[in-house]
Image (cartoon, grey):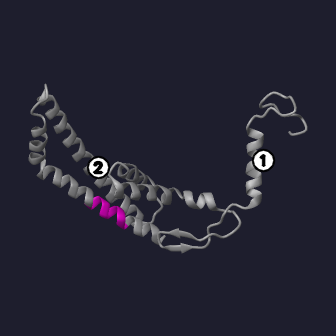
């Protein structure tokens, strides 16, 4: 579970970035308002647009604080290693709207916490090196030829066809 500890540390660092962003919004709100106001000199109703800008600043501040809370909670849960998935998943979804680092951390967290990589690759034959957060893992497997044939057979039975003059979707008694 070393990967979860590393992920927990990254979430705590991301939470610190979110707190810094919220502080910067508060500190520079006057400058931001002045810069936005300078763009509104020739619009018909500048007061309405300025009100929308203030609502946007308040919303961005709230999102940063909520995201920081869930980031710290996700980091703490992942560092403890108790297997809880709620806080990391909420933090991952909130991080998806925060730019490149948030997107990368959010997607990686969803994949790691849900166990999608191991679920997809479990039980197959043929080893393939798989790069993880802690190095190269040789236990991941590729699907075997029999699994591919089974999938093709299932697909053939599910997708309707018009063979032998029978209507689409109807199977003959010999196939069932």
Disc 1 crowd rating (10 Å Cα; few below 14, some 14-19, many 20+) is few
Image location of residue 68, percent across then percent down: 29, 55
Mark 1 and mark 2: Cα distance apart in space: 48 Å
Residue name at image x 61 percent, y 57 percent: 120
**Quadrant in which residue 48 is drawn:** top left
Above or below, 75 against 172 in this view is: below
Disc 2 packing (10 Å; few <14; some 14–19; many ≥20): some
Residue matched to label 2 = 66
Q: Residue furthest front?
A: 42
Residue 151: image x %, image y %?
73, 50
Residue at x 75%, y 48% (from the top left corner): 152
In this picture, residue 170 sits left or right of residue 76 = right
Q: Secondary structure at mark 1?
A: helix
Q: Total label count?
A: 2
Left or right: where 160 falls relative to 42: right
Seen in the picture, residue 82 relative to 170 is either above or below; the reply is below
Instruction: Residue under label 1, please give it.
Output: 153
Q: Which mark is in front, 1 or 2? A: 1
Residue at 81%, 27% (x, y): give it.
Answer: 167
10 magenta-colored: yes
Residue 126 appears at what percent x and percent y? 69, 68
Helix, strand or loop for disc 2:
helix
Q: Is residue 21 left or right of residue 78?
A: left
Residue span colored magenta: 9-16
Using the rendered view, name the quadrant where residue 56 is placed.
Answer: top left
* Nearest the eye: 97 or 18: 97
């Amino acid at each position: 579970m070393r990967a979860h500890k590393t992920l927990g540390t990254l979430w705590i660092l991301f939470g610190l970035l979110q707190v810094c962003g919220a502080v910067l919004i508060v500190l520079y709100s006057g400058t931001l308002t002045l810069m936005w106001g300078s763009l509104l000199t020739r619009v018909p109703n500048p007061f309405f647009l300025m009100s929308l800008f203030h609502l946007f600043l308040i919303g961005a501040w709230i999102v940063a604080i909520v995201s920081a809370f869930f980031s710290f909670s996700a980091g703490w849960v992942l560092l403890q290693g108790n297997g809880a998935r709620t806080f990391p998943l909420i933090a991952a979804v909130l991080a998806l709207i925060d730019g490149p680092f948030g997107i990368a951390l959010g997607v990686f967290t969803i994949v790691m916490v849900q166990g999608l990589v191991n679920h997809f690759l479990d039980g197959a034959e043929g080893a393939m090196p798989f790069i993880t957060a802690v190095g190269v893992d040789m236990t991941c497997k590729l699907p075997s030829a029999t699994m591919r044939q089974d999938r093709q057979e299932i697909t053939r039975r599910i997708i309707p066809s018009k063979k032998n003059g029978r209507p689409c979707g109807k199977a003959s008694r010999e196939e069932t």
